[in-house]
């Protein structure tokens, strides 16, 4: 298993995994479905070294993006020194391998190297299975919050409560 930055040659694979994730979400009745994300956004993340991939046997098994600010979602914590994990998408051939725990381990090392105090992520709606999974992966569930300003956020953030999770790191 290797974790590395995604490159522009990975963009079709990233969008394929997003589509698979979205199709899977559509099969669940109580899950918020991802919209079609803007290619330009992902290209920017790749160029800024904020899009990552987990490789197993030369195959992309999982992808995710990070941000260092997330002011619209984390309104009261916008000045915290944090890494925000977004859009974790798993290749179905590798489901069940606890990739969020592996991402958490990677993020803790990344945070330590970059003097970051928090690892954070969010999900939308009352997806109790995902909430439990994130908690088992080491995140504290901070609760569900109505977002005040969703302008500019991907469509799935509109009219949905955000579930916020974080790991506070010891320095």
Image (cartoon, grey):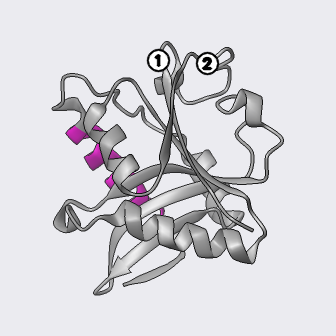
Which quadrant is the N terminus positioned in?
Answer: bottom left
Seen at 70% across and 39% down, the residue is 70
Spot occupied by residue 49 in the image (x, y as percentages of width and height) = 67, 68
| Residue 138 part of the magenta-drawn span | no
Q: Which stretch appears magenta?
A: 11-24
Seen at 27% across and 62% down, the residue is 91
Q: Residues within 10 Å of mark 2 (few under 14, many from 20)?
A: some
Q: Is residue 80 visible?
A: yes
Q: Are marks 1 and 2 in contact (CB under 8 Å)?
A: yes
| Residue 17 part of the magenta-drawn span | yes
Our reading of the magenta stretch's main secondary structure is helix
Q: Give me the C-alpha separation between circle 1 and circle 2.
A: 8 Å
Kind of element beneath mark 1: loop
74 sits to left or right of 98:
right
Q: Which residue is mark 2?
A: 147
Q: Extreme right residue here?
A: 79
Q: Which mark is residue 160?
A: 1
Res 113 quadrant in image: bottom right
Spot occupied by residue 51 in the image (x, y as percentages of width and height) = 57, 62
Which quadrant is the C terminus positioned in?
Answer: bottom right
| Residue placed most toward the observer, 141 or 105 | 141
| Residue placed most toward the observer, 166 or 31 | 166
Q: Is residue 161 above or below residue 82?
A: above
Q: Is residue 10 visible?
A: no
């Amino acid at each position: 298993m290797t974790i590395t930055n995604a490159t522009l040659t990975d963009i079709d694979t990233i969008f394929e995994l997003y589509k698979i994730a979205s199709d899977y979400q559509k099969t669940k009745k109580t899950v918020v479905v991802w919209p079609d994300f803007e290619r330009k956004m992902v290209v920017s993340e790749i160029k800024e070294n904020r899009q990552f991939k987990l490789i197993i046997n030369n195959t992309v098994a999982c992808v995710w993006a990070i941000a260092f600010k997330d002011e619209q979602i984390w309104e009261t914590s916008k000045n915290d020194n944090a890494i925000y994990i977004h859009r974790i998408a798993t290749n179905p051939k590798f489901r069940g391998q606890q990739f969020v725990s592996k991402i958490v381990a990677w993020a803790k090392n990344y945070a330590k190297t970059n003097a970051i105090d928090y690892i954070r992520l969010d999900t939308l709606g009352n997806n109790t299975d995902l909430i439990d999974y994130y908690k088992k992966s080491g995140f504290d569930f901070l609760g569900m919050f109505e977002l005040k300003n969703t302008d500019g956020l991907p469509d799935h953030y509109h009219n949905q409560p955000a579930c916020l999770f974080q790991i506070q790191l010891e320095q």
